[in-house]
Image (cartoon, rainbow, N blue to C red):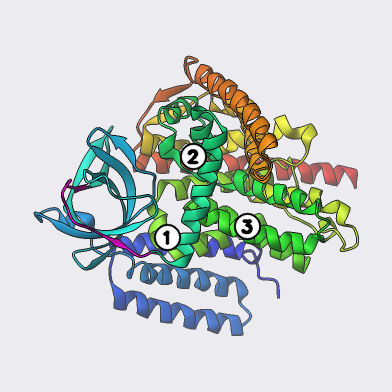
Amino acid sequence: MRRLNLGHLLNFFIFISFALGIAVGFHFKCFFTCVSLLVIFLSFTYFFYRKNKLFVSDIFILLSFLALGALWVRPFAHKSLEDFFNEDRNIVTLKVISIPQERGFRNTFSAQVRNIDGITVNSDIKVMDYSRKMEYLNSYKAIGRLGKRDFHGNNFYVFWVKSKTNLEKLSLSKWDGFLKTADAALLSLFKNNMDELSYRFSASVFLGRRELFGEGREIFKDAGISHLLAISGSNIALVAVGLFFVLQLFNIKYRPRLFIALVFLIIYTFVTGANPPIVRSTIMYVVFAVGFFARRKINPFNSLGLAGITCLLVNPLWLLDVGFQLSFLSVFALILGSAIFPLTPWELKRKDFPREEDSRKLPAFAGKLSLFSSEICLNTANCAKYTFFASLFVTLLITPLIALYFGRIYILSIFHNLILIPFFGIINLLIFALITLAPFSFLTRSMAEVISILVIWFMKLTQFLGSVPFTYVTCKFNSWQAGAYYFVLAGALLAIKYRRDKRRGEVKAVTV
């Protein structure tokens, strides 16, 4: 039965309600109140559903998820790291999640804290390891001291480990061991076949090892293209479509091809760290793949909502992650822009799905799937137009967050993206080709040489564009200013959509 008004976007609104509930749960820890409200809202949902008041029933479904979000965050909202600052020493269990970098007499890296002094804590932290014994993707129990540092107005937590401290290395699970082996193999492939710059570039943009990129991150930041360093939709699209074509060479039918691609995408997601943006992209791709098998119409807003709900069910603390917020807001901007200013179809119709006997249509359809899990356009004739408007919408919606967290407003990044995104996509495609050609050393070397030349050109062009005057202005937003910006922007978009719908109605009336 079709639900009134909310039904076609119900998953998306559920995601918003669940996220708001998590935000409420961080500030108000009233367990019994939330349980009572959840029972009441569920009761009203059932009551109005039985009365066939579907719109009212949907409203109470959203309120139910609001209460559920406030409850869901409680097991994850453990003690803050600051509660342990007064201790002379802390016993911390952690997992190293970035490659240790040498800094004088110490190694620095990011780690995921599991517990402190036997108390469960779920948080990421910067580690200053003077023992220089901790290795990437291993887990340890270490004695050290917790503190806080300030860097350009942003606070981050630090864990200091002395040079002579005792470290207890914890055993790896089979899955973690496999991921570590796969990650090491890819890093070795890049390092053995590329020059230093290309190795660091490839490890950063394809595996998410941004700690290796060093000064390159500042070059990306100045040009307003830091989002390209986030492993997200474009990588998922590249791996998915690339695997389709590679498997097609072995004459594998397209349904098994789709399944194999999904398996590799899930492995790739975990190899790159399973950060919120790539988890979102993978879930969206899985949703569209399931829709492909079921031959069902797919709404991108709902697939985005389903991805968001899944991420927050796994870890509601991701809601506070800047990468999570920017990733979801960027994809929302792309879908919203396509809905208001249709440059490409934003729903897959039943006729779009290729028939089983017509496997030649699959590469084109794979491109369609990739569109909604990434920022890649379908129509090459409209590529520049789509890239410009996609970049415009993303910039409009993420500007307040960039100003809030990083104190910058990018002015020319829209035009920079128009130039650099296609260039970046070509390099990423060649990196994937390098991986597939790994068994053939001669071809691998040749491909690595081409990548090295393109990386040098790309970095020089990025550095030049980042140095252009007025590329960005320094401007720090507070939460109230960001809220006011979104309020005005929402009003402007609604007014534009109203005028467009009214004009279409008038044209249709005249035609009739």
Mark 3 or 1, nearer chain start: 1
Give me the disc on residue 20: 1
The answer for how far apart the CA atoms under marks 3 and 1 are is 33 Å
What x and y, as percent, mark residue 138? 36, 56
Label 3 to label 2, Cα distance in Å?
A: 31 Å
Quarter occupied by residue 379: top right
Q: Quadrant of the N terminus?
A: bottom right
Q: Which residue is mark 2?
A: 398
Q: Which amino acid type corresponds to the residue marked 3 in the rendered image?
A: Phe
The residue identified by callout 3 is: 264
Q: Spot the residue most to the front.
A: 441
Three-letter amino acid code at the position of disc 1 = Leu
Q: Which residues are magenta?
A: 160-171
- Give the mark nearest the N terminus, 1 or 2: 1
Q: Are marks 3 and 2 in contact (CB under 8 Å)?
A: no
For numbered disc 3, what is the local secondary structure? helix
- Report x, y in % for residue 496: 64, 39
Instruction: Residue at 58%, 24% (x, y): give it.
Output: 458
Density class for disc 3 (Cα within 10 Å; few <14, some 14-19, many ≥20) is few
